[in-house]
Image (cartoon, helix red, strand yellow):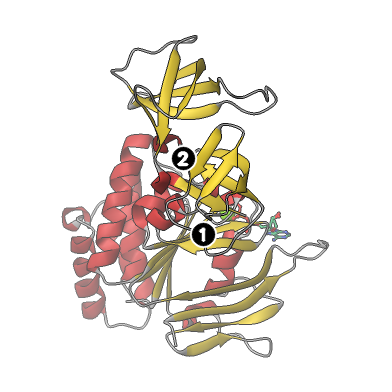
Amino acid sequence: MSFIQLENLTKYFNGSADPAVASLNLTIQKGEIITLLGPSGCGKTTTLRMIAGFEHPNKGTIHIDGKEVYNEAQSLPPEKRGIGMVFQDYALFPHMTIMKNVMFGLGKWSARDKKQRAKEVLELVGLEGYANRYPTQLSGGQQQRVALARALAPKPHVVLMDEPFSNLDAGLREKMRFDVTNILRKANTTAIIVTHDQKDAFAVSDRVVVMKDGIIQQIASPREMYRCPKNCFVAQFVGKTNLLTGIMDDDKMNIHTHIGKVTLPEQWKERLETVKLSIRPEGCHLTEKGAYCGVVERVTYGGEYQELYVRLHNEPHLSKEPMLIYAPIEQDVEVGTIVSFNIKPELVALVE
Ligand SMILES: Nc1ncnc2c1ncn2[C@@H]1O[C@H](COP(=O)(O)OP(=O)(O)OP(=O)(O)O)[C@@H](O)[C@H]1O
Ligand SMILES: [Mg+2]
């Protein structure tokens, strides 16, 4: 059995005809870092709260470390589930020192053991010199590391974090993604992190779970999720993409679309008729005498690259979206420039 197993988890809130979470199945290995990713209201927090025991599912079972902590007949209370929780606002006690904050979760431990363990986890999060400060005397990133230290102190089976990076500015956010992952790995802890930010999810996780309307859309490693999104929703939610419809060739590899023939990375397992394609903008690279040619309709300077919206010459369908292509910043392109490009099959995916 997997370390954490969620089976058929379903949650209806009173007064709502649609479930907030619907028949969710997920298994997590020991030491894995998983993120639940999806738009606002898709059921991420509800899932996390059901695992923690703050919310009762209407259906389903939850196993943690081989133990059934929830089924329809009985529910283990949150404090008995072996869970460490990091809240979005960190929820540190302002009147207690950092040391006391971290010792707080250690309940019945002896005073000496509490102190020893608090020292250990403060060292783990790189705040050993801050034990006697108060939370208001720390930066946002430091407060978050204290919250993580407090959650890790009782050696929980799993750490749950709800939107841990949302209170941090862009620079600190990037640093904390790295720090938090490092700390979780060093502690060898299993973790489930909730975020609506694709960059957070990709930077910290072994596997990402994309949800929409309470339903899991895809579970995959960041690389696989980006390169092989399962459906149009996932393709658009994790990064930008071009979605096209086409007819599959007999060779099960080439798709005839309104921009011309597009090749899949490998032969598809079955012959289909009409199919949908996701083509990543990074997969389109400008080159002389490329297979596709068009005029630049719009340019957005992205810093690391330029976003070009290209209307293809052979495209009579003005109703269709122009193709989005990323061009290197050193390339001189402006609205009206005629460009030609090729498409890398590795960044083309057939989607549902
Ligand atoms: N206590 C509650 N009572 C009634 N409905 C609720 C309650 N909590 C959540 N919901 C509803 O359940 C659905 C899922 O909510 P949830 O908080 O899990 O979303 P989320 O994915 O965490 O969104 P966000 O990214 O905005 O935090 C939403 O439609 C929400 O309105
Ligand atoms: Mg939420």
Name the quadrant of the C terminus. Answer: bottom right
From this view, report whether residue 289 is shown above or below residue 142.
above
Q: Residues within 10 Å of mark 2 (few under 14, many from 20)?
A: many
Please, what secondary structure does the residue beneath circle 2 have? loop
Give the foreground label among 2 and 1: 1
In this orientation, which residue lies closer to the viewer: 63 or 14? 63
> The residue under label 1 is which amino acid type?
Trp
Quadrant, the N terminus? bottom left
Q: Quadrant of residue 257?
A: top right
Q: Residue at x 40, y 27 (%)?
A: 290
Amino acid at pointer 2: Arg
Relative depth, front residue between 291 and 163 = 291
* Mark 2 or mark 1: whose residue is earlier in sequence: 1
- Residue, disc 1: 268
**Mark 1 vs ligand 1: CB below 8 Å:** no
Place of residue 43 in the rendered image (x, y in percent of width and height, measured from the top left): 63, 59
User: Taking the image as drawn, is residue 134 in sight?
Assistant: no
Location of ligand 2 given as a quarter of the image: bottom right
Residue 276's spot in the image, x, y percent?
61, 47
Numbered disc 1: secondary structure = loop
Residue at x 45% of width, y 11% of height: 337
Residue count near mark 1 (Cα–Cα under 10 Å), binned few <14, some 14–19, many ≥20? some
Horizontally, is 32 left or right of 67 in the view? left
In the image, farthest residue toward the front: 250
Which residue corresponds to the image point at 25% horizontal and 70% vertical from the top-left? 187
Q: Residue 316, percent across and down?
A: 66, 23
Give the residue displayed 19% in from the left and 67% down from the top: 119
Q: Which residue is mark 2?
A: 280
Task: Kindly report the distance in space between the C-alpha atoms of the residues bearing marks 2 and 1.
Answer: 19 Å
Location of residue 81 with respect to 149 vertically, above or below: below
Number of marks: 2
- How far across and down, in percent of the image, does residue 7 sit? 59, 80
